[in-house]
Amino acid sequence: MSTEELKDTEDAELIIAVLAGNLKAFDELVLRYQRAMLTVAQQIVRDPTEAEDIVQDAFLLAFEALPQLDNLNRFGSWLYSITRNRALRFIKRASKFQLHEDEDAELRIEADPASSDPAQILVQESTHEAVRDTINSLPAEFQEVIKLYYWADMPQKRIAEFLSLPLTTVKWRLHKAKELLKSLLEKRGYGDVL
């Protein structure tokens, strides 16, 4: 199969190709799910570097256990479970949960000498931080869907498969998350953001 053909292939067919020895098919699965898995891992561990390690570990475990997958159509939700369990295991091993925020806006200004207006950058950073904090204040089921949709660029159908939820539930949660986000941002004085 060519790379273009792989992109249009269903997960189950790709898994069969992987089991037949086609490693490019597994590469396509990695491309499809990597951002979503990073989103899930980062939501739990809050550290992008650790989340990347967790995702790599999850993909390795999935690759090794692929022959034992009973329902090939549930590959996405199986990956979600592996990723979530690996992230939770990491938290348990770390024995304390520390929230790691991005670097200070001041450090980012210094790192970007091309920026001409530090005041504007601080306003943008403040707005981005407010949106991120507001998303993180949403109930977990809404956070998860909105992060997968916007941050991991995952279509609603794939989110449904990934989370083992009906598509209607994903659509409702996404709609409700947007409503809550808009309402909370307005209360916090950022009504013009959305």
Image (cartoon, helix red, strand yellow):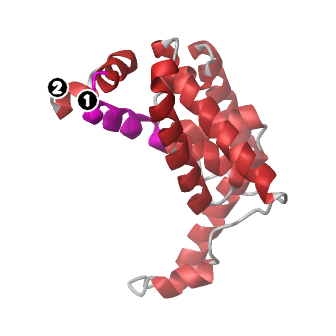
The residue type indicated by label 1 comes to Asn
SS under mark 1:
loop
Q: Is residue 185 visible?
A: no
Residue placed under numbered mark 2 in the picture = 1
| Residue at the outermost right position | 96
| Magenta stretch: dominant secondary structure | helix
Q: Position of residue 91 (x, y in %)?
A: 76, 52
Residue placed under numbered mark 1 in the picture = 22
Question: Residues at badges 1 and 2 in contact (C-beta under 8 Å)?
Answer: yes
Q: Is 6 displayed left or right of 188 in the figure?
A: left
Above or below 102: residue 135: above
| Residue visible at 58% across and 45% down in the picture | 39
Is residue 23 found inside the magenta-colored segment of the image?
yes
**Mark closest to the chain's N terminus, 1 or 2:** 2
The residue type indicated by label 2 comes to Met
Above or below 91: residue 116: below
Above or below 72: residue 133: below
| Residue visible at 26% across and 23% down in the picture | 8
Q: CA distance from mark 1 to mark 2?
A: 9 Å
| Stretch of the chain drawn in magenta | 20-34
